[in-house]
Amino acid sequence: MTETAIEASGLRKAYQDKVVLDGIDLAVRAGAVFSLLGPNGAGKTTTVNILTTLVRPDAGTVRVAGFDAAADTRAVRAAIGVTGQFASVDDLLTGEENLRLMADLQHLGAREGKRVVDGLLARFDLTESARKMASTYSGGMRRKLDLAMTLVGRPSIIFLDEPTTGLDPRSRRTMWDIVRELVADGMTIFLTTQYLEEADQLADRVAVLDRGRLVAEGTPGELKRQVPGSHVRLRFAAPAHLDAAARVLAGSTPEPESLTLRVPSDGDVKSLRFLLDRLDEYAVDVEEFSVHTPDLDDVFLALTGNPSTEAQTR
C-alpha cells in the first residue's frame, strides 16, 4: 500500500440544487485513523460513498490504495472494507454462517474459509455464540459480527461510518479496542462518527466538515488549541481568599457560590508556576486547582454552523 492510503482532490457533489460537497481535499496516511466529523447534512456519508466507489463525484479525483477510483474501481473495492451505520448481518443466519457466506463471496477455499472464519470468531469473542441466530445478538455483538464480515476479505483500508451508533458505553469501548488492534496490524481506518470523544480517543488526524466544506483539519490536540477557553480553576476555603486572589490575578472571573476563580491560561508549566508564585507572593492560600482545556465538543461547536435537519442528511 502507498504511503498515502486515500487522496481526494476537489470533490464536488450536488443533488439537484443542493450542494452536498463543495470542493474538498483529503489525504489519509497509511496505517492511521482519520476521522471525519460534521453535523447531520454536512456531507460525511456522501464523502464515504464517493471514496468507496458507491457514488461518482460531479468533479474531483480520488485515489484509494494507490488506485484511481474512477478508472480502477474493481481494484479499489478489492482493497477496502466498509462498515455502514447499520449492521448488515443476515438475521436468518447464524454468526458463523454470515461469515462463511462472506468467505464464499470472496472465493476462499473450504479450508482457507474455515481458517479465516474460526480466526475472526475468536478475535471478536464470538466463538460461543457462533451457532446462534444473528437475530438473537445484542447490538454490540451485531456490530462486532458486521466488522468481522468486513475483514473476511483482508482489506488494507476500512471505512467505518458511525460504527458505534446506538451502542452502550461498554460495547462502544470494546469497538474502540478492536479499532486500535486493527491499526496495530497495519490497517488504515477512515472513521466518521457523531461521538466526539470517539474521534479524540482513536484518530491520528481529524477533519471537520460543515455544509460541504472542510473547515478545519489537524490532530485532535491541534484542533483544540484553535479554540479559546483554556483556563485554570482555583478553589478557596473562604470568600476573603477568593476576593484577594481576584484582585491579584488580572482578567480572572470569580464564582462566589462555589468559591472558585477562573483564570485564563494555556495550562503549561511555566504559566502555572507564575500563577501560583504570584498567589504565594501575596500570601493567598489555594485549597485546590485544576486545569481545563477545550475538548473536541468545543471545537465542533465553534467551527460548525447550525445542524441541518435529518431530512437533509445524505
Image (cartoon, rainbow, N blue to C red):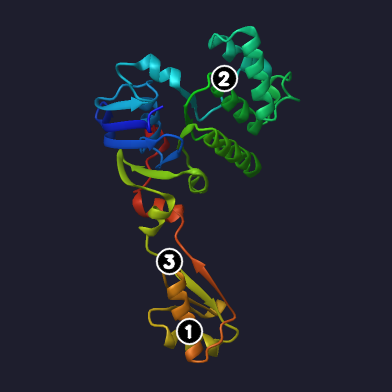
Disc 2 element: loop
Label 1: few (<14), some (14–19) or many (≥20) C-alpha neighbours in 10 Å: few
Say which label, 3 or 2, has the lower sequence index: 2
Q: Is residue 287 above or below residue 218?
A: below
Label 3: few (<14), some (14–19) or many (≥20) C-alpha neighbours in 10 Å: some
- Residue 230: numbered disc: 3
Residue drawn at (43%, 87%), measured in percent from left and top? 248
The Cα–Cα distance between marks 1 and 3, rounded to whole angstroms, is: 20 Å
- Residue 152: numbered disc: 2
- Residue 277: numbered disc: 1
Q: Is residue 230 above or below residue 221?
A: below
Tag 1 and tag 3, C-beta contact below 8 Å? no
Residue 277: x percent and y percent? 48, 84
Say which label, 2 or 1, has the lower sequence index: 2
Residue type for callout 1: Asp
- Image quadrant assignment for residue 164: top right
Label 2: few (<14), some (14–19) or many (≥20) C-alpha neighbours in 10 Å: many
Q: Tell me, yes or no, if residue 179 can be seen here.
A: yes
Q: Tell me, yes or no, if residue 94 can be seen here.
A: no
Residue 11: x percent and y percent? 27, 31
Residue type for callout 2: Val
Say which label, 1 or 3, has the lower sequence index: 3
The Cα–Cα distance between marks 2 and 1, rounded to whole angstroms, is: 60 Å
Residue 208: x percent and y percent? 37, 44
- Image quadrant assignment for residue 4: top left
Residue drawn at (41%, 65%), measured in percent from left and top? 229
